[in-house]
Image (cartoon, helix red, strand yellow):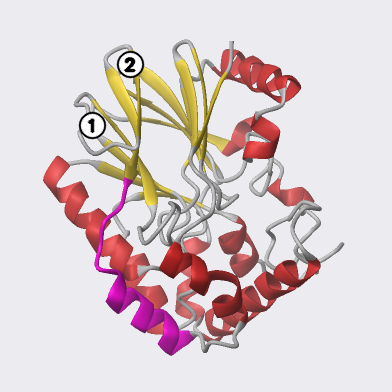
């Protein structure tokens, strides 16, 4: 086991892990990688209320929120929402340390230094989590994946990929591969899936083909666009959104990648209070929070 690199066996997804849920034609907001950002969450809650939407959080809900009150604020705010675990939550709720570190299962293109920083971030978060035993109940029975039937379509909501909570096969480097595209299409057919909504890789990407789409939102809780923007989330509804970064219509339903707008200044102040400028979180993420990512949204069109 290599901390932060090796994917734990119990992350692997089997048929029983895909919890089926039926919604009654209700708009959905799918939030991937909130990272404990209460400011992003407050804005998402306002959007949810305005649309009478169902919110689904697909893992790594926590990351920067190593303060007990911040962690508790997030969990209490999402108490009525649908939630699955990401690797962050899997390793928080694990009783015995198996040496997985952050559980991110980083591929080889991630530097050893960045992997070690992620391990240190998770260690600080878990130290707080273990010290407050009331927090464990929030994560104890949280599932790994959803198949949601809504608007006559079937949506797979996962954290990493369809094989593992921390799988990287929905990263842009893999989705461009034709063999991977064939593998995904076979899975869509097997499970009768119309759209996959995932996160985990911190890098936004879309794969589409006729009548189907996969959206990896990158992250909701930190900047996932070029420049001084904020995070991204996925919206599903019968109404097309004027502000969508990407929109795919499937049988009269719009599956859209949306920008999340909130006041960044208090978020940065909060982050700086928790994570000093020489901390692993600041070294890994502060520049991205302020200045965004270097790459444009990649939209891969498969035949």
Count the marks: 2
Q: Secondary structure at mark 2?
A: loop
Res. 49 in view: yes
Q: Which mark is residue 26?
A: 1
Q: Which mark is residue 152?
A: 2
Query: Mostly what secondary structure, the magenta segment?
Result: helix
Q: Is residue 151 left or right of residue 274?
A: left
* The stretch drawn in magenta includes residue 187: no
Instruction: Give the position of the C terminus as an image quadrant.
Output: top right
Residue 20 image point, x, y percent? 46, 31
Residue 144 image point, x, y percent? 56, 45
Q: Earlier in the sequence, mark 2 or mark 1?
A: 1
Q: Quadrant of residue 4?
A: bottom right
Q: Is residue 31 left or right of residue 86?
A: left
Give the answer, above or below, for where 155 lies relative to 62: above
**Residue pictured at 53% horizontal, 61% vertical:** 140
Residue range (magenta) = 259-274
Residue 26 image point, x, y percent? 23, 31
């Amino acid at each position: 086991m290599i901390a932060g690199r090796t994917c734990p066996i119990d992350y692997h997804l089997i048929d029983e892990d895909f919890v089926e849920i039926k919604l009654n034609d209700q708009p959905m907001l799918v939030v991937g990688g909130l990272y404990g950002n209460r400011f992003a969450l407050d804005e998402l809650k306002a959007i949810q209320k305005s649309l009478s939407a169902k919110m689904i959080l697909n893992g790594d809900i926590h990351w920067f929120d190593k303060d007990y009150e911040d962690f508790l604020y997030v969990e209490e705010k999402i108490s009525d929402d649908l939630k699955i675990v990401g690797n962050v939550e899997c390793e928080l709720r694990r009783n015995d340390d198996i040496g997985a570190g952050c559980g991110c299962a980083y591929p080889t293109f991630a530097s050893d230094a960045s992997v070690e920083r992620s391990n240190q971030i998770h260690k600080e978060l878990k130290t707080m989590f273990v010290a407050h035993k009331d927090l464990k109940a929030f994560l104890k029975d949280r599932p790994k994946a959803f198949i949601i039937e809504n608007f006559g379509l079937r949506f797979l909501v996962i954290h990493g990929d369809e094989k593992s909570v921390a799988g990287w096969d929905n990263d842009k480097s893999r989705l461009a591969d034709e063999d991977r595209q064939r593998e995904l299409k076979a899975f869509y057919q097997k499970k009768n899936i119309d759209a996959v909504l995932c996160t985990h890789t911190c890098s936004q990407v879309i794969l589409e083909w006729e009548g189907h789409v996969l959206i990896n939102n990158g992250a909701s809780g930190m900047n996932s666009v070029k420049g001084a923007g904020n995070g991204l989330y996925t919206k599903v509804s019968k109404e097309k959104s004027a502000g969508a970064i990407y929109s795919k219509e499937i049988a009269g339903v719009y599956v859209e990648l949306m920008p999340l707008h909130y006041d960044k200044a208090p978020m940065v102040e909060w982050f700086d209070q928790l994570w000093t400028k020489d901390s692993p979180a600041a070294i890994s993420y502060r520049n991205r929070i302020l200045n965004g990512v270097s790459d444009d949204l990649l939209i891969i069109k498969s035949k």
